[in-house]
Amino acid sequence: MTRLLRGIVWIAVPFELAFVTVLLGGAALPGTVLVGAEALAVALLVVAGAGLAVLHGRGGPDAVRDVVPEPVRRIVGHELRALVSLFLWVARVRGERRSAHEPADDVLDLVVASQASLTLELREPITAVGFLGKRRPVTTVRLHADDPAGLLAALKAATRETATAE
C-alpha cells in the first residue's frame, strides 16, 4: 500500500506541476484537456486519500506518518487551523484594497501579489506557525480574496451566528 501511495505521488505531483507550468506559460488548451486533467488530479487525490484512510485503519497515525512527510502534514494542519480560527475568533471584518503596508509582528499577511482585500481583527490572539515552524501570536490577518465582497458577507454572517450562539 505504501508503495502504491508513493507511486501516485510520483505521478501526480510532476503531472500537476507540468500542467500548471503550461497554463502559466499562456498555452491555450482545449476545454476537454482541462477537464480531463483536473478529473485525473481529483481521482488521484481520492485514491491517495482512500489509501491513507486504509493505512490509518490498519496501522494508526504512525502508518500515515511514515507515508506523508512531516512538512506536508505541518502545512496542511496549519491551513486547516487557520481556516477554523478565522471563523471562530473573528471579531471585526473590514474590506479594503491595500498594496503597500508595513510588516508588523502581530499581523499575518496572506496576500497575493502584495495585495490584501480583507483585514480581519481577531478578538484574541492566535498562534500562527510559519512554514519553517516559527510560532508567533497574531491579532490581525490581512488576506486577498478573489471575491472580497462575498467573503466579507459570509464572515459577517458567521460572526453574527457565533455571537448569537454565545
Image (spheres, helix red, strand yellow):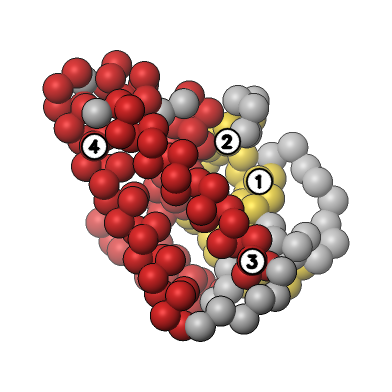
> Which residue position is annotated with label 1?
108
Query: Which numbered disc, 4 or 1, marks the residue closer to the eye?
Result: 4
Q: Which residue is drawn at 62% across and 33% down?
A: 131
Compute the Cα span from label 4 to label 2: 30 Å
How crowded pointer 3 is (Cα within 10 Å; few <14, some 14-19, many 20+) is rated as few
3 or 4: tag closer to the N-terminus:
3
The reply to whether the C-beta atoms of the residues labelled 3 and 4 are less than 8 Å apart is no
Amino acid marked by disc 3: Val
Which of the 4 image quarters holds residue 104? Answer: top right
Amino acid marked by disc 1: Leu
3 or 2: tag closer to the N-terminus:
3
**Percent position of residue 93, x then y:** 55, 64
2 or 1: tag closer to the N-terminus:
1
Q: What element carries label 4?
A: helix
> Which residue position is annotated with label 2?
128
Quarter of the image with the N terminus is top left
**Percent position of residue 110, x then y:** 64, 53
Query: Which numbered disc, 3 or 4, marks the residue closer to the eye?
Result: 3
The reply to whether the C-beta atoms of the residues labelled 2 and 1 are less than 8 Å apart is yes
Q: Is mark 3 on a helix, strand or loop?
A: helix
Where 125 sits versus 112, above or below? above
> Which residue position is annotated with label 4?
51
Q: Which residue is drawn at 49% across and 33% down?
A: 72
Amino acid marked by disc 2: Ala
> Which residue position is annotated with label 3?
22
How crowded pointer 4 is (Cα within 10 Å; few <14, some 14-19, many 20+) is rated as some
Compute the Cα span from label 4 to label 1: 34 Å
Compute the Cα span from label 2 to label 1: 7 Å
